[in-house]
Amino acid sequence: MEIRRGEIVCLLGGNASGKSTTMKTVIGSLRPSQGTVFYEGLDITNWNTSRRVGSGIAIVPEARRIFPRLTVRENLMMGAFTRRDRTEIDEDLDRVMQMFPRLRERSTQRGGTMSGGEQQMLAMARALMSRPRFLCMDEPSMGLAPVLVEQQFETIQQLNQTGITIFVVEQNAAMALAIANRGYVLQSGRVVLQGTADSLLQNPQMQRAYLGM
């Protein structure tokens, strides 16, 4: 698989196809038994997750995985854990709260008491606090109402327009392909389809298996 600078690339497939395993390998929480992970020309296969985050990779994990007992502000500061530039951290904190005004309103509220949509905002804003160049998103539509799913994917597009390269693992194939430049389809750990988003949307196999057509 290849993800080029400035793209939105989606990874699609059914349950147990290997999507989340691929994402975990990219972020460094799993080590591959074979193969290599390259990032900006560097072999990062043996780098730990902290080093990858420090190099510009961030993740919005499946099911959000916020810190439920920490406040919204404390959750956001955890996203900047690898940084030491205090002035810039404060600037970024203000910036993400402008991007997600609800988080400013709830800054002292514990994360675990927020709705699913609010927690998704928090997980995304927390990832942005590390100043990523490459953002991985694992099932961003999971558990959200349809209107919130649309808002989520609009936000992904807006982030991409700021220059962040985005890799999305998603079961909602139609929504993911609507915003992506290219896509890959996994089946039992193997890439069985790949191409531009438009070509995948028009692919009969894709339409039957993943688009309900």
Image (tube, rainbow, N blue to C red):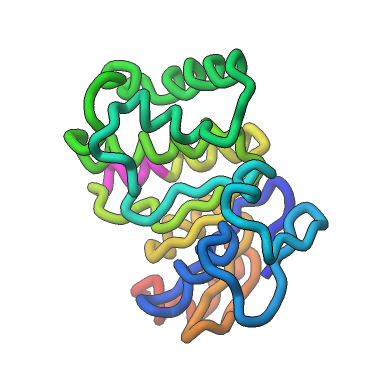
**Residue 159 appears at what percent x and percent y?**
55, 36
Q: Quadrant of residue 193?
A: bottom right
**Residue 101 appears at what percent x and percent y?**
36, 20
Q: Which residue sits at x=47%, y=86%?
A: 188
Q: Nearer the viewer, residue 10 or 47?
A: 47
* Residue 149 among those drawn in magenta: yes
Instruction: Answer left or right for 70 relative to 134.
Output: left
* Residue 112 among those drawn in magenta: no
| View extreme (left): residue | 113
Q: Quadrant of residue 121?
A: top left
User: Split into 4 quadrants, where in the image is the C terminus?
Assistant: bottom left
Up/down of 106 relative to 151, above or below: above
Q: Which residue sits at x=59%, y=62%?
A: 26
Dominant secondary structure, magenta: helix
Up/down of 29 relative to 136, above or below: below
**Residue 176 appears at what percent x and percent y?**
47, 57
**Residue 67 appears at what percent x and percent y?**
31, 40
Query: Which residue range is magenta in the image?
Result: 146-152
Up/down of 72 relative to 142, above or below: above
Q: Nearer the viewer, residue 81 or 209?
A: 81
Instruction: Answer left or right for 173 relative to 39.
Output: left
